[in-house]
Image: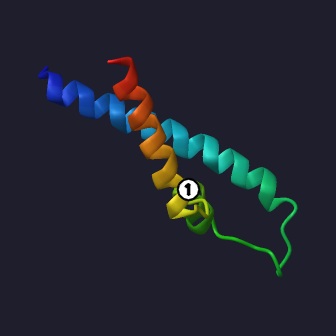
């Protein structure tokens, strides 16, 4: 078997394992859902894998980057 095929099979198995675990979690949550707070498994999965972005201050990030750069240059 080619390494590419093996890698794909392992990746697919890993993804299936993650989805199975997520399904189990959704079933636990489902038992506490009502009509008002129901969420489909597909929506639950999308929310779980959706990147969570923090509210960041761009100026603060740039300041920290400059400080890191300065410290890195002083140790070289």
Residue 34 on image: x %, y %: 86, 74
Residue 3 on image: x %, y %: 16, 22
Q: Residue furthest front?
A: 74
The quadrant of the image that shows the N terminus is top left
- 7 shown above or below 69: above
Judging depth in this view, the residue of 65 and 9 nearest the camera is 65
- 26 shown above or below 33: above
Q: Residue at x 36, y 38 (%)?
A: 12
Q: Residue at x 52, y 57 (%)?
A: 51
**Left or right: 23 as drawn, with respect to 67:** right
Q: Which residue is mark 1?
A: 60
Say whether residue 50 is visible: no
Q: Residue at x 26, y 34 (%)?
A: 8
**Left or right: 23 as drawn, with respect to 74:** right
**Left or right: 59 as drawn, with respect to 13:** right
The quadrant of the image that shows the C terminus is top left
């Amino acid at each position: 078997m080619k390494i590419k095929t093996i890698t794909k099979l392992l990746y697919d198995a890993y993804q299936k394992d993650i989805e199975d675990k997520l399904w189990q979690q959704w079933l636990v949550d489902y038992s506490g859902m009502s009509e008002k707070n129901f969420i489909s498994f597909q929506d639950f999965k999308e929310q779980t894998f959706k990147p969570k972005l923090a509210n960041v201050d761009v100026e603060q990030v740039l300041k920290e980057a400059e400080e890191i750069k300065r410290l890195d240059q002083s140790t070289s």
